[in-house]
Image (cartoon, rainbow, N blue to C red):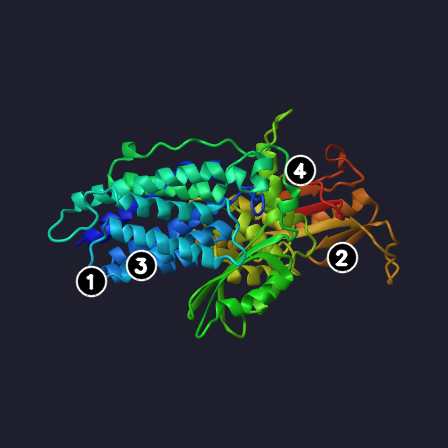
């Protein structure tokens, strides 16, 4: 049996999320404060997605949730799912409103209770930020609350009691929240004159606009009519002149949850401010949400290890986000299309020994619900495993030990299957692939087999050939390709022989694939399967 209260509430939340999703990129493109990383719309949407998932969970319970359970569950879901400044502050707006609704058992949700909930939401939002800045979503939620409180004096029906139909209640709440939406729209327009960084970039505040978009969706959801959506102006992206002086000097946007007992959010703030900025620590004695911009995510995590259990770690590379945002908004002079399997993964392929937190940032950047991590080096497997364990996004490690083997195995990837199923498929493929390489010797061989600069061939990690470049490549392929059907050769940036001139004589039954890789260090990478 569907619980009508949850069904109605989810309908409203779904409408709000749908409106935000339709303008998500617009909100992202407005994002210049506090860091121009272009993810405000994404972070607010993720917070709302977490709320919808929680409503689905409650809807599936055999005993319907009452209002107290519903609002507390929603507030916790928003907290757990929040990411970035905008997501965390949005979660506190949700928490404040939920606490007010829960404090009035037996009262129908009516204009008076909505006004009180918005006021408490504004207080919670301001309390979450150590140095609140006007001209942000904080200002807008306060202006919304004030507008609704003022509007109450002009309403014929402020309270609801006795038998009231769902439709009557929804229409009255929609009227009140449309007043809040209009007030919020006006407050958003004024943000440009409240923050110098917004005036310089020629934009309104991204989080403030996102909040008003969400509330407009709520109004449409209450009216159960997407065409009844309050019309909101579309805002142009920031000008190309970038407000450098407001950008974080730190690299990683770090978010995680801490669970324990007797947690004091304020006690952790000074330590985090020593290693970063944009610090937010919110929640209660049992659960804290932590957000900080830092170069040392591991130090931020360590600050909480004795206090409780750290989970749902999410690390985003803001430098990459800022560069991607600027590239997206920069007017094009010459266009180009490149097909690649993720810029973040390419960077990891080229990195020598990325840290756990660099891999975490790479996981975050992949535009998929689940991620496979291919370390491509024995030295990186441990860090990759730790990153996958810490990641908030589901991630599985496939223990690839070389780039060329991983490339050959990736043809087995099925994008419509789960990470777990793909991990098993790729691991099985890797077990059937042998890898090799040819590189110039970095030093003279102690055994006298070769001198610095000679070609050296490897089968796995074993030296199997040496001498001239062409003969060493042929000999190495001969060792690696025994019993194989396909051999792939990938040349590097300093390979001494062009691909189309390689002196290779291979058996007729062996298919040869040649590719340009441009990798440093190795003249040729070899995979046989």
Residue 100: assigned label? 3
Q: Which residue is mark 2?
A: 463
Residue 39 appears in view: yes
How many neighbours does mark 1 have within 10 angstroms: few (below 14), some (14-19), or many (20 or more)? Answer: few
Single out the mark in the foreground, 1 or 3.
Answer: 3
- Secondary structure, mark 1, is loop
- The answer to which quarter of the image holds residue 168 is top left
Query: Which quadrant does the N terminus fall into?
Result: bottom left
How many neighbours does mark 2 have within 10 angstroms: few (below 14), some (14-19), or many (20 or more)? Answer: some
The span from disc 1 to disc 3 (Cα, nearest Å) is 24 Å
Single out the mark in the foreground, 1 or 4.
Answer: 1
Camera-side residue of 56 and 359: 56
Between discs 4 and 3, the one toward the N terminus: 3
Between discs 1 and 4, the one toward the N terminus: 1
- Secondary structure, mark 4, is strand
Position of residue 247 measured from the top left corner of the image (x, y, whole percent): 62, 46
Q: Which residue is mark 1?
A: 63
């Amino acid at each position: 049996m569907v619980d009508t209260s949850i069904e109605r509430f989810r309908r409203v939340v779904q409408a709000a999320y749908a409106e935000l999703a339709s303008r998500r990129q617009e909100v992202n493109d407005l994002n210049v404060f506090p860091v121009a990383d272009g993810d405000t719309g994404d972070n607010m949407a993720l917070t709302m997605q977490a709320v919808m998932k929680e409503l689905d969970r409650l809807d599936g319970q055999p005993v319907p949730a009452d209002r107290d359970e519903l609002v507390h569950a929603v507030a916790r879901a928003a907290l757990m799912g929040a990411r970035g400044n905008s997501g965390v502050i949005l979660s506190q707006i949700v928490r404040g409103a939920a606490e007010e609704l829960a404090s009035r058992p037996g009262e129908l949700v009516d204009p008076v209770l909505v006004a009180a909930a918005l006021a408490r939401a504004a207080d919670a939002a301001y309390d979450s930020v150590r140095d609140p800045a006007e001209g942000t979503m904080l200002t807008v939620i306060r202006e919304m609350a004030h507008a609704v409180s003022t509007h109450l004096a002009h309403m014929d029906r402020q309270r609801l009691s006795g038998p009231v139909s769902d439709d009557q209640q929804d229409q009255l709440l929609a009227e009140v929240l449309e007043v809040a939406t209009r007030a919020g729209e006006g407050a958003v327009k004024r943000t440009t004159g409240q923050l110098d960084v917004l005036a310089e970039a020629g934009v309104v505040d991204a989080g403030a606009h996102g909040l008003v978009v969400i509330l407009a969706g709520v109004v449409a959801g209450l009216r159960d009519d997407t065409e009844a959506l309050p019309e909101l102006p579309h805002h142009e992206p920031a000008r190309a002149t970038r407000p450098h002086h407001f950008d974080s000097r730190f690299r990683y946007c770090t978010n995680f949850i801490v669970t324990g007992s007797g947690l004091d959010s304020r006690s952790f703030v000074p330590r985090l401010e020593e290693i970063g900025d944009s610090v937010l620590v919110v929640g209660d004695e049992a659960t804290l949400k932590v957000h900080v911009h830092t170069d040392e995510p591991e130090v931020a995590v360590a600050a909480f290890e004795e206090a409780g259990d750290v989970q749902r770690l999410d690390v985003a590379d803001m430098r990459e986000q800022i560069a991607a945002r600027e590239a997206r908004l920069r007017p094009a002079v010459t266009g180009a299309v490149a097909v690649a399997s993720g810029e973040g993964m390419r960077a990891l392929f080229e990195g020598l020994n990325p840290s756990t937190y660099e891999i975490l940032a790479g996981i975050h950047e992949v535009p998929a619900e689940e991620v496979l991590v291919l370390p491509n080096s024995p030295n990186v497997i441990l860090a990759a495993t730790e990153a996958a364990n810490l990641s908030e996004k589901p991630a599985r490690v496939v223990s690839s030990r070389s780039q060329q083997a991983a490339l050959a195995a990736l043809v087995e990837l099925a994008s419509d299957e789960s990470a777990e199923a793909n991990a098993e498929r790729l691991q099985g493929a890797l077990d059937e692939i042998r890898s090799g390489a040819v590189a110039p010797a970095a030093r003279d061989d102690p055994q006298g087999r070769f001198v610095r600069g000679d070609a050296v061939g490897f089968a796995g990690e074993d030296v199997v050939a040496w001498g001239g470049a062409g003969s060493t490549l042929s000999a190495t392929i001969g060792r690696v390709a025994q019993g194989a059907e396909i051999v792939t050769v990938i040349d590097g940036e300093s390979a001494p022989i062009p691909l189309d001139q390689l002196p290779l004589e291979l058996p007729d039954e062996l298919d040869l694939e040649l590719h340009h890789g441009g990798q440093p260090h190795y003249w040729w990478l070899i995979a046989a399967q």
